[in-house]
Image (tube, rainbow, N blue to C red):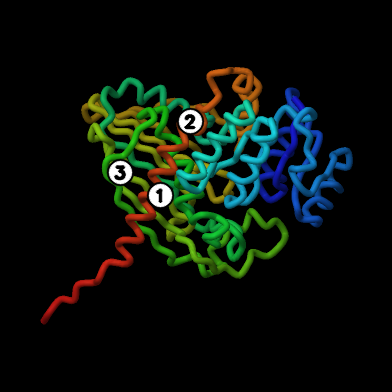
Amino acid sequence: MRVAVVGLGWAGRSIWLPRLREHPRFAVAAAVDPDPAARASVAAAHPDLELLADVAELGSARFDLAVVAVPNHRHADIAERLLTAGIPVFLEKPVCLSSAEADRLAAAERAGDVTLLAGSAARYRADVSRLYEVAAGLGAIRHIDLAWIRARGIPDAGGWFTRREQSGGGALVDLGWHLLDTLTPLLGSVDFHQVVGTTSDDFVSDGAWAASWRHGAQAAPAGGGDVEDTARGFLVTEDGTSVSLRASWASHEARDLTAINVEGAAGTASLRCTFGFGPNRQDRSVLSLTRTGQTTAVPLPDEPIGTEYRRQLDELPAMLADPAARGRAIAEVRPTIAAIERLYDSARSHRSAPQLVRAG
C-alpha cells in the first residue's frame, strides 16, 4: 500500500514514519508538512521520500492511504480534505474536537466514497486485550475506573499542546481520549445519561513538569498555556453503569500509572500499567482478578513499548478492504467526543458558579 504521512511533528516522525517504513505491507512514498524545517529534517533521514508542503499536492490515484498526525486543531480539516479527494485516511487521536467536526468527517467519508480509520492504540495493547477477555467473564459490568496519571509529562509545554485554540483542550483531550476509547469493547457504543467533571491547572505553567522525552537533547520549553493538566470526571450510562475518569499530565506521583478497574456482578478485574512512551514507567503490567475475596494474578506477555502501534498497522489493510468499516470510526468516536464536550461544560459551569461565603 502506498502511504503518505501527513504531519511531521513528534508523532509523525517518532511513531508512524519509522513503523510504516519497516512494515512489509506499506510503502511510504511521501510526507507532508508546511514547515520547511520539518521537511528538511525528514529529508536528511529519508532522502528517497517526496516531501510536500500541502495535502493538495497529493494525487488520489497515487496513494492508498494517508496517515494524519497533524496538530489537533488541523485533524478534521486535513482529514476532510483528503477524504473528499478520495484518499482513505488513518487519523490519529483525537479524531475530532467537537460533535460538529464528527459530522463533517462523516459527510466527507460519504462524499469521497473512501474509509476513515481512527487511531486506537490502547485497544491494541496485549495487556488491555487480555483485560477484555477477563472482563467478559465478570457478568454485568457495574462500574469502571479509568486513570492515566503522569508524574511529569506535559507535552510540548508552552507550545501548541497547551494552547486551547490549537489543542482543543489539555489532559482530557490528550490522555482522556485514550481512556474513554477503551470503553467501547467493554460497554459498546454508549451514551451517558449523567456527566460531571472538574479540571485544574496546577502544573501546566511550570516548565519543570514538561515531558522531557519529547524534546531529545533540546531543553524543554518554559511552560505556560491555557489548558488543564488534570481532569476528573464521573459518568453514568442510561442503564446505570458508572465510569470514573482521571487524566493527569503531571502529579506528585513517583511514576506514570495507567489503571483500568472493571467491576462486574461476578468479580473485579484490575490492570495497572503505563500507556504511551514516557520513560518513568511501572516496572511491568499487572492484571489481577478478584472473586469472593480471592485475588489471582492473570499472566501477561511482555512486549516492547509501542508494539500496539505496529499491531494497528498489521490490521489496517484488512480494515480498509472491509466495506463494513465505512462509517465505523465516526460511530465509535461520537460517544467519546460527546463525553469530552460534556465534561468540559460541567467543569466550566463549576468555575463560573458563584461561591458561597460562610458566615461567622
At label 1, the amino acid type is Glu
Per the image, the residue denoted by label 3 is: 235
Residue 127 is marked as: 2
Q: Position of residue 296 (x, y in %)?
A: 34, 27
Q: Marks 3 and 1, Cα distance to the nearest angstrom?
A: 12 Å
Horizontal placement of 231 versus 82: left or right?
Answer: left
Residue at 57% x, 49% y is: 278
Q: Position of residue 338 (x, y in %)?
A: 40, 43
Q: Marks 3 and 2, Cα distance to the nearest angstrom?
A: 24 Å
Density class for disc 2 (Cα within 10 Å; few <14, some 14-19, many ≥20) is many
Q: Quadrant of the N terminus?
A: top right
Residue at 52% x, 47% y is: 281
Q: Position of residue 12 (x, y in %)?
A: 69, 44
Q: Marks 1 and 2, Cα distance to the nearest angstrom?
A: 29 Å
Among the two numbered marks 3 and 1 on one chain, the one whose residue lies closer to the N terminus: 3
Among the two numbered marks 3 and 2 on one chain, the one whose residue lies closer to the N terminus: 2
Per the image, the residue denoted by label 1 is: 341
Q: Nearer the viewer, residue 189 or 109?
A: 109
Q: Position of residue 188 (x, y in %)?
A: 38, 28
Among the two numbered marks 1 and 2 on one chain, the one whose residue lies closer to the N terminus: 2
Q: Nearer the viewer, residue 204 or 152?
A: 204
Q: Quadrant of the C terminus?
A: bottom left
